[in-house]
Structures are given as structure tokens and as C-alpha cells.
Image (cartoon, rainbow, N blue to C red):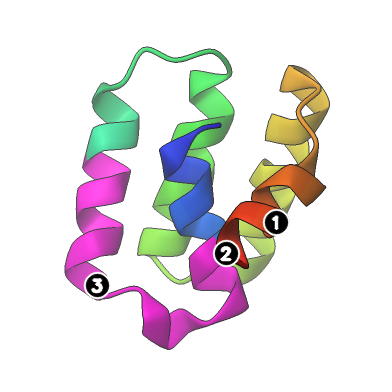
Amino acid sequence: MNKHILVVMRWLNDKDSVSQEELEKNNNEAYAANTHAAYEVYNAAAAADYDYVSQAVYWLGKYFERTGENSNDYRKELNK
């Protein structure tokens, strides 16, 4: 499970639950990380950092499409 994607999804569910500092940190860490689907992860994190909801949703979709991960697993994690 990608921690940067979790932050973006948490932000999309409730923008007040994630501080601007946390979004900036997530964006910077996502940029520095060399992860599978790094391009999608970075773009989703950057979109959240700059408050671009539609772009964040788009890149999340691309992330799940490319990795084959299940977005419902992420939603379950967020609801814990």
C-alpha cells in the first residue's frame, strides 16, 4: 500500500484532515521516491498539494490502473 496515495485519498475525503504542511511533505517525498508507478504517485501528490481535485482524482485512477491495486483496500484502510 502506497503511503503517498493514502494521504491524497484522505485529503480527497476530507480536506481539513490533512494540513498544507503534510501535503507539501507528501509531495516532496513522493517526488523523491523511486516507487512503482512513481509518475502517477507524484502527480497525485502534487495535485493535492496545489488543491487540484480533478487532477488528483485522475492520477489516482491512473495509479490504480497501472498497479492493479484495489482502491477499495485503500478506502478500508482510511476507514480504520
Mark 1 Cα shell of 10 Å, populated few (<14), some (14-19), many (≥20):
few
Is 42 contained in the magenta span? no
- Residue on which the image places disc 2: 80
Residue identified by numbered label 1 = 76
Under mark 1, the amino acid is Lys
Residue 60 position, x and y percent, is 67, 45
- Report the amino acid beneath label 2: Lys
Q: Is residue 59 above or below residue 1?
A: below
| The label number, if any, that marks residue 4 in the structure image | none
- Whole-angstrom CA distance, mark 2 to mark 3, is 23 Å
Tell me the element at label 1: helix
**79 to the left or right of 46:** right
Cβ–Cβ below 8 Å for labels 2 and 1?
yes
Residue 42, horizontal then vertical, whole percent? 44, 35
Q: Is residue 55 left or right of residue 68?
A: left
Tell me if residue 11 comes above or below residue 70 in the rendering: below
Dot 2: few (<14), some (14–19), or many (≥20) neighbours within 10 Å? Answer: few
| Residue under the point 72% across and 20% down | 67
What quarter of the picture does the C terminus occupy?
A: bottom right
Residue range highlighted in magenta? 10-28
Q: Residues within 10 Å of mark 3 (few under 14, many from 20)?
A: some
Badge 3 element: helix
Of the residues under marks 3 and 1, which one precedes in the sequence?
3
Q: Quadrant of residue 36?
A: top right
Q: Position of residue 41 (x, y in %)?
A: 51, 34
Query: For the residues marked 3 and 1, what is the alpha-carbon distance in whole angstroms?
Result: 24 Å
Question: 74 or 46, which lies in front?
Answer: 74
Relative to 15, 25 lies left or right: left
Query: What residue does disc 3 label?
Result: 20
Relative to 80, say whether 64 is above or below: above
The earlier-in-sequence mark between 2 and 3 is 3
For this orientation, the residue located farthest to the front is 80
